[in-house]
Image (tube, rainbow, N blue to C red):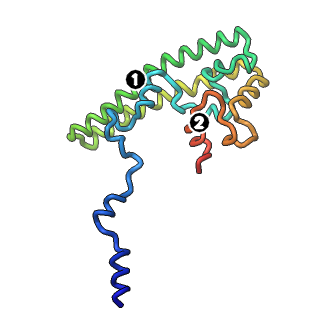
Amino acid sequence: MKWIALLAVLLCPIPALAQDHAAHSAYAGFETRAIKSLSDADLDDLRRGAGWGLALSAELNGVPGPAHLLDLKDQIGLSTDQVTDIEEIFAAMQSEAQDAGLRFIEAEAAIEAAFRAGNLDREQLRDLIQTSGAARAELRFIHLVRHLDTPTLLSSEQIARYNALRGYSESDPCDMVPDGHDPAMWRRHNGCDG
């Protein structure tokens, strides 16, 4: 009987040890960010007018966008006129996306500041979220609408070549990360890590 009591004591967690082994949040470390909802990489992407994954609905449904078309212009066989037209679309997109990205950053910073100040009520929070949501929606529109503009400049063969070069084919997308993609983001968006 004594050995059962000893075993129970040995198997019972000690509070200090349990605290050392406490699960950490996936967000641990985010508390040091200036804007908690945005990483340094997010801020950089938004300021540069980068896609930020906002055009995946078009991209992954075979509707090319200007940035990657320009990256692959030689492999796709774009003509000089096509390149010029796509460069114009890209320049307009990037300029608009940079402006919209800054508005989104400002909106998220306002939410951050309101929570930091601690004097936020429900109505103010709703207004801040709606401002942020509108800025993000505009940013997404800016990126997605350019995917509507570019296919009309391309032949069906060029679009098929684009999709093959980007890795959007019958093969398993986890087998190859296309040029120009961040490997970790590619694997996460294609469900390769689960």
Q: Position of residue 31 (x, y in %)?
A: 32, 41
Left or right: where 112 falls relative to 152 = left
Which residue is more in the foreground, 181 or 142? 181
For the residues labelled 2 and 1, the Cα–Cα distance comes to 26 Å
Which residue is more in the foreground, 170 or 122? 170
Earlier in the chain: of badge 2 and badge 1, it is: 1
The extreme right residue here reads 157
Q: Position of residue 12 (x, y in %)?
A: 34, 74
CB contact under 8 Å: marks 2 and 1 = no
Residue at image point 68% right, 40% down: 173
Residue at image point 21% right, 37% down: 117
How dense is the environment of label 1, judged by Cα within 10 Å: few (below 14), some, or many (20 and up)?
some
The disc at residue 102 is: 1
Image quarter of residue 69 = top right
How dense is the environment of label 2, judged by Cα within 10 Å: few (below 14), some, or many (20 and up)?
some
Residue at image point 59% right, 47% down: 193
**What type is the residue that disc 1 sits on?**
Leu
- The local secondary structure at tag 1 comes to helix
**What type is the residue that disc 2 sits on?**
Pro
Q: Is residue 108 above or below residue 12?
A: above
Which residue is more in the foreground, 16 or 143? 16
Q: Is residue 9 above or below residue 169?
A: below
Q: Nearer the viewer, mark 2 or mark 1?
A: 2
The disc at residue 81 is: none
- The local secondary structure at tag 2 comes to helix
- According to the image, label 2 marks what residue? 183
